[in-house]
Image: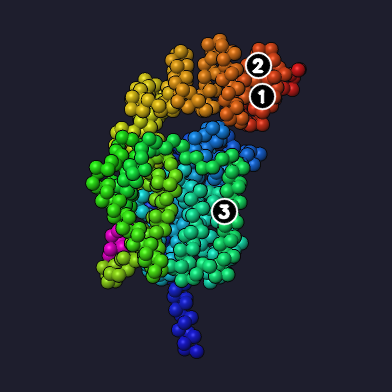
Amino acid sequence: MKIFNIFTTLAHSLKRVTWTGILSLVLLTGIVYSNTLGVSAFIRDDCYIIEANPFLGRWSALPRLLTTGYWEASMGSAAPVKEYRPALMLTYFLNCRIFGLSPRAFHLGNLLLQILNTILLFILLRRSYGVEPAFTAAALFAILPVHSEAVAYISGRSELLVLFFMLLSWKALDPQKPRLAWGLASFAFALLSKEQAILFPIFLAAADACLYRVPFHLPPRRRVYFGLAGVAGLYLLLRQAVLGHGLQAGRDYFSGAGYLTRLLTMSRFYFEHYLVPMVTGLRIQFDYARPLIPDSTPADAAAWLCLACWTALLAYSLCRAWKTRSRTAFWFLTAVLFLLPTGNLILKLDTLGADRFLYTSSVSFCVLAALAVSRLRPLFRRTAVCAVLAWYSFISVKLNPVWAFQESFCKAALAGNPYSAKSIAQLGYELWHKGELEPAIRQYDRALRLAPDLTTAYYNLGSIYMEKGDLERAKLNFQKALQYDPTDPDTWTCLGVVAERLARPDVAGRCYTRAIELQDFNATARYNLAHLLLMGGHPALARPHFEQFLRVAPDDPKAPAVRKLLAGLKV
């Protein structure tokens, strides 16, 4: 009986420690990221993915939202980046329908996901390492400074959501008590949140072998892996059906460079701009655009040294994981695994890197750091943990406001990379929308001197000149934008507007038609083309475009007048 009472007391004590730990993690995460909740603006990709998305405004558009590529809603069918993330878009949709188009509500959603990920990580690690190391790793993960972009930037939600569903799937597919249906469903949602989840079965197999010492080829586990393979296959078929082709990640950042250049540059980049900032919280960069970081040539000794170190670590970890099922090796290999999709070594991306790409891989760093600290004496261990948490919290609180407004981001990005044409152009955009047209034009001209093929700069310059009434300059800039990107529907629409104002209805009609071909739900092009046809004496041709306009934008301010017009339109 006494033994039973002892075990009962220990169980209750462990439960209290666990709930105390969870509450502490919630408070820590909430405090550090509380300054993201006062944001009242969308920035960068948020403006396209969320604010200008025509499918987030009404329930009737939900089927179209879930069957459209991530970028196609804003850029049309010819979007250079092909991604399919309906689960992510569904969270944006629910955010919008429940709270309206409020940036604060979207930031609150990101914060809640960060809290959930931290709690799940604590629960999952507790089984393998005990309460204290699990708490340390989860606390580090909660406030790691390199997570600021993923949490404080609304479009970083893809990183938060994919990890959330992968952690859920990992928990549900526990070897001791697997819940196959829940695990497969979570894996499916992870795939529909971000493409990197396709690597989860490899992670799970390695976790089975190294963390749980369960061979993944045993019959009970085979069912799990056959199920995961089936879900992955269905996802790939669905993705192909929606997007029409395979993975496309935009213009290759290393276009024209050899693979050795790519490998050397990324090896040095990983060390200087990923590992050092993740460990220290310092030297965090917001824009890696050229020419800030030059490509590493075979003469770059530092790049060769970095490559040698990474290669040695990888080989050692593979050997240790294979021979001894080393947990340390497992976590290093996990970090490498989830960095592969964004490393420019297998897939060709249009960017060198971003801190949000570290979000999933940083779990490994937090676990390894917690295990290293756990070897210290109790007093030193707790002092070290408290000091590191205080430092990381301080840095994260300072970083979060960078993602609050476009202007604050541009200034921070340009402070670290004064040669970034995109950041200069984004600063021009902010000046334009503050009504400072001439300073905005100077910023765009400066951006184009650095990057003559920056289509957004030409597009926005054309819009500014159109606003000023200088139609010839507007036309030249829109034409220049189309010279570099002939598949942008918004540019074709604006060029059509300019043509109308220049009394060229034939040219305007062709421009609107081309915009609709590229983006059939382009409400502005539909309305303008319908109005142009009606004024040209073609009501029968105008009617279907007016009707499509109403289907696409039923809440548009012009919609009541269009309904009234159609009711009396005789064809």
Task: Find out whether the residues at labels 1 and 2 contact each other: C-beta distance under 8 Å.
Answer: yes
Q: In the rendering, at what x and y percent does residue 429 appear?
A: 41, 28
- Residue 379 position (above or below residue 439): below
What amino acid is labelled 2 in the image?
Answer: Leu
Q: Is residue 537 left or right of residue 209?
A: right
Task: Name the residue rendered at 58%, 23% in the picture.
Answer: 514
Give me the C-alpha separation between circle 2 and circle 3.
48 Å
Density class for disc 1 (Cα within 10 Å; few <14, some 14-19, many ≥20) is many
Magenta residues, dominant SS class: helix
Q: Which residue is situated farthest in the bottom direction here?
A: 1
Numbered circle sitting on residue 239: none
Where does label 2 land, which residue?
Answer: 533
Disc 1 designates what residue? 545
N-term mark: 3 or 1: 3
**Label tally:** 3
What segment carries the magenta color?
A: 382-391
